[in-house]
Amino acid sequence: DIQVTQSPSSLLASLGERVTITCQTSQSISNNLNWYQQKPGQAPMLLIYYATSLQTGMPSRFSGQYSGRSFTLTITSLEPEDIANYFCLQHYSAPYTFGAGTKLELK
Amino acid sequence: QVTLKESGPGILQPSQTLSLTCTFSGFSLSTYGMGVGWIRQPSGKGLEWLANIWWDDDKYYNPSLKNRLTISKDTSNNQAFLKITNVDTADTATYYCARIDYYSSYPDYWGQGVMVTVSS
């Protein structure tokens, strides 16, 4: 199975701050990685697909980049509604595997 | 509008069979390219892909649990099902279903999950 290492596991940030979350995969997966946002008691929502594409309807302050096996999710300016858990998913090969998640909280 | 909702027993005892239902709307599992996957997350732990089923009834099972899983669908009622046999406390988790598109290969819409506790 492809291992996905996500960091940090938790993050304290201030409103307006730039936030970066990273996932590193154990082998090359091209761009087959997605980012999801999940708020307590709600369904996960697709944020970024194929590493860099913003899902329709999601704010443009979210962006994704990748280089080799390293993938990043960036929030350019943190808004209150961005407080949530974030996780990545590799869909390059089965079984699909996930990052452990990042809990983003307000400082 | 695509929605999915999971349902399950809430609590069951070790060695029993867990039966989960995913009831969805906004798409059909008889449509070419559509699929539903099941994913779980034990409390405080990471997500784990369990199984998925496609419009043509092709199925995939995570090898780590393959012998215990059975996935199926009822296209006329827009439902997908997952059974896990011989459960134990390690199967205590929140279980999610999600829609998958065959051509994109990833889950795009998820349900909010259902909590299942295995306890004697």
Image (cartoon, helix red, strand yellow):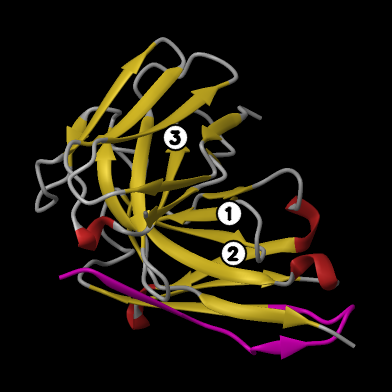
- Which residues are drawn in magenta? B1-18
Against A35, residue A42 (above or below) is below
Q: Amino acid at mark 1?
A: Ala
Count of numbered tags: 3
- Residue at numbered disc 2: B71
- Residue at numbered disc 1: B51
Q: Nearer the viewer, residue A103 or B48?
A: A103
| B15 within the magenta span | yes
Mark number displayed over residue A91: 3
Displayed quadrant of residue B95: bottom right
The secondary element bearing badge 2 is classed as strand
Residue under the image location 47 percent in, 70 percent down: B73
Q: Chain of mark 1?
A: B
The alpha-carbon separation of the residues under discs 2 and 3 comes to 20 Å
Q: Amino acid at mark 3?
A: His
Q: Position of residue B28 (x, y in %)?
A: 27, 67
- Give whichever of discs 1 and 2 has the lower sequence position: 1
Q: CB under 8 Å between callouts 1 and 2?
A: yes
Residue B87 showing in the rendered view: no
Q: CB under 8 Å between callouts 2 and 3?
A: no
The secondary element bearing badge 1 is classed as strand
The alpha-carbon separation of the residues under discs 3 and 1 comes to 13 Å
| A13 within the magenta span | no
The alpha-carbon separation of the residues under discs 1 and 2 comes to 7 Å
Against A94, residue A81 (above or below) is below
Q: Position of residue A16 (x, y in %)?
A: 17, 45
Q: Residues within 10 Å of mark 3 (few under 14, many from 20)?
A: many
Displayed quadrant of residue B94: bottom right
Q: Are marks 1 and 2 on the same chain?
A: yes
